[in-house]
Image: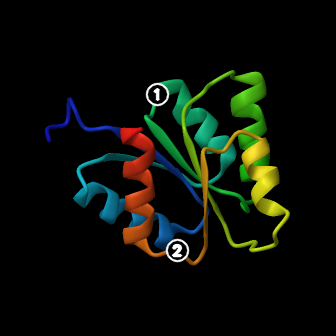
Amino acid sequence: MNAETAKKILLVDDDEDLRNLLGIYLKMAGYEIFHANHGEEGKEQLTKLTPDLIILDMMMPILDGMGFLKWLRQEAKQDIPVLALTGRSKSETRPIVLELGATDLILKPCNPDELVKRAKKILNA
């Protein structure tokens, strides 16, 4: 897959190690990866690119995933698929995140292979 046809994924997570690890797995799967450290950086990235998928951590400083997702759907009116990452396994998190407009949700710590599988499923849907 060449760079022109590679699907773009924006990874928004304040955990640099996890972001880099997931980035490596996604690159190996043939995706072009862009990084943001928090929601505000994610918004900034969206002024420069239109990703095919956003992988979004829910708990971050500055602008968290919930705030970013709300902004993305309600203000920016973007319907880019979002794969939410959350360390909160509370049962009420899933419906809230999906109601805000996430396409899918994966719990942290997540298996990078599982994340790639979910990303592929969303991107090929």
Residue 50 is labelled as 1
Q: Is residue 22 left or right of residue 28?
A: right
Q: Which residue is situated farthest in the front direction here?
A: 125
The residue under the point 45% across, 28% down is: 49
Tell me the distance, in whole angstroms, between the alpha carbons under discs 1 and 2. 25 Å
Tell which of 115 and 34 is nearer to you: 115
Q: Is residue 116 left or right of residue 48?
A: left
* Residue 18, percent from left and from top: 49, 71
| 56 relative to 53, above or below | below
Question: Is residue 61 visible to us here?
Answer: yes
Tell which of 36 and 77 is nearer to you: 77
Residue to which mark 2 is pinned: 110
Kind of element beneath mark 2: loop
Q: Is residue 19 left or right of residue 58?
A: left
The C terminus lies in quadrant = top left
The N terminus lies in quadrant = top left
Q: Quadrant of residue 84?
A: bottom right
Q: Amino acid at mark 2?
A: Cys
- Determine crowd level at label 2: few under 14, some 14-19, many 20+ residues with C-alpha closer than 10 A: some
Q: Is residue 100 left or right of residue 45?
A: right
Q: Amino acid at mark 1?
A: Thr
Q: Which residue is situated farthest in the left direction here?
A: 2
